[in-house]
Amino acid sequence: MGQHSEHGAIAAGHALTAKAAEEVLRAGGNAVDAAIAAAAMACVVEPVLAGPAGGGFAMVRADAAGAPVLCDFFSQTPMRRNVSAWVEAVEADFGDATQTFHIGPGTVAAPGFVPGLLALHERYGRLAWEALLRPAAVVAEDGHPLSEFQANLPCIIAPILMHSAESRSVFAPSGTLIRAGETLRNPGLARLWRLLAEGGPEAWENEVWPALLAVAGPDAGGHLREDDLAAYEVCWRTPLLAEMPEARVWLNPPPAASGTMIALALSRLGEVLEAEDCFACACALALDHADRLRRDADHDLAKLLAALPASWRGTTHISVVDAEGMACAMTVSNGEGNGHMVPGFGFMPNNMLGEEDVNPAGAALFPENVRLSSMMAPTLAEDVHGQQVALGSGGSNRIRSALLLVLARLLLRGEALAVAVEAPRLHVEDGAVDAEPGLAAAEMARLRALFGEVRAWTKPSMFFGGVHAVLRTADGALSAVGDFRREGVGVVL
């Protein structure tokens, strides 16, 4: 039912990420202030999922009646290719399968994370910039015990984290990767947040840029140059609006691909539900419809938009609604990291040019000076009853499936937030279905009749995303749910 709150509600991927946002709300900050503090903390306590040289998106609604706006601070490709750029492949071990990732100086795109937080603060911030970064600096310096989930992630990408001496000093100080319950300290990252807290954009440009270019510039085997960093711009975009019979959903617009895919699936879902009694099957058919259009259009977003009517990857999400009704849904990513730490500052640059999802041309053939596309999808929605929700997910191309299922349960079936987030998920791609346990036998049988291949998973998994969501009813009652699949935390305060 939700509860009335003096300060607001938060959903995030780690207890300390949520705590950073909570402290800001209690101090009088708004939802954007809280999301900024949480994003900085995520770089400390969710270091495989977030980083200061990554990027992301934030969907912001300044009040319960206003029009949302999308802040795009995702990575930009360099303006010139370096023909001598260095890229190498490493194998990540997921247990049941392995996956090839590309790392090295030649995979680094221009980062937007810090410029994005600065731009959000300039436009919406209430508390002082320094106050928002201080909690992250303290935890990075003092250290925190590694959770079971966060300890598992480094094991998956061990070749990346063990690639350089600087990275090993943080993630494997004893020679082996840090384990659950052991203390993770990062004094270099503490130094970064203190430097940025005191010096703002000037410190980022004058002191961090040279260190970043030392491991990602042409002399190091990368493409990135100072003019790439100087030319980077945060973009404010009009969200893609998906109209439903009893709800509206604001989605990440192009050049991101995520919102278009979700909008296509939502537009199809209503029709399918009229003919299909099985809810899970209807969602699968809607997702398959969007996926088929994606393949037919060869990833051309213009063609996909025309079809609309009049990971295991390094991504995490933060949702915040404050007591005054401001909402912020922020999704950030660092890819998997490029294997090399920025000297003196305790963080690894992104490897976005080596990410097939965002740069299918490959690290050597990226289009120059363009905003990379993304599957990240921070989302806001409201229904005819005045209920508003802020949500998003990690999970690479499974993001669209996770959000469609949660939105459909919330907006079409009227399910409670916790039920919608925790319900079994499925994902459809290339005509095949992956399904979590928990669907009824009849639903699974119907799925097998509709699709050629249905892979039944034995337990819920982070493969199916991590939807962290907050909800505000028309009378101001709040609820928050962090997805158990990614050790999420929901707090109402």
Image (cartoon, rainbow, N blue to C red):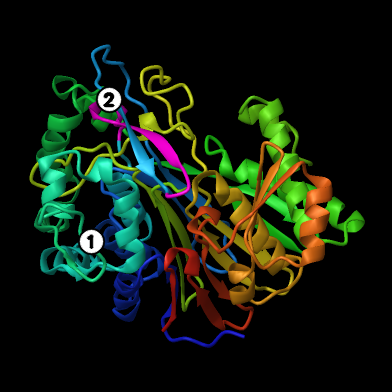
Taking the image as shown, residue 381 lies to the left or right of residue 269, namely left
Callout 2 secondary element? helix
Residue 97's disc number? none
Mark 2 = which residue?
A: 106
Confirm whether the magenta stretch covers residue 443. no
As displayed, is residue 459 above or below residue 254? below
Rendering quarter of residue 389: bottom right
Side of 236 relative to 279 (left or right) = left
Q: Is residue 342 left or right of residue 440?
A: left
Q: Looking at the image, is 391 positioned above or below residue 399?
A: below
Q: Position of residue 255 (x, y in %)?
A: 53, 34
Does dot 1 land on a helix, a strand or a loop? Answer: helix
Segment colored magenta? 95-110
Pointer 1: what residue? 129
The answer to which of 72 and 63 lies nearer the viewer is 72
Residue 270 percent location from the top left of the image: 82, 55
Q: Residue at x 48, y 70 (%)?
A: 482
Residue in the picture at 35% in, 49% down: 156
* Front residue of this view, candidates 136 and 118: 136
Using the image as rendered, state which of residue 200 and residue 368 is in the foreground. 368
Residue 98 on the magenta span: yes
Residue 352 visible: yes
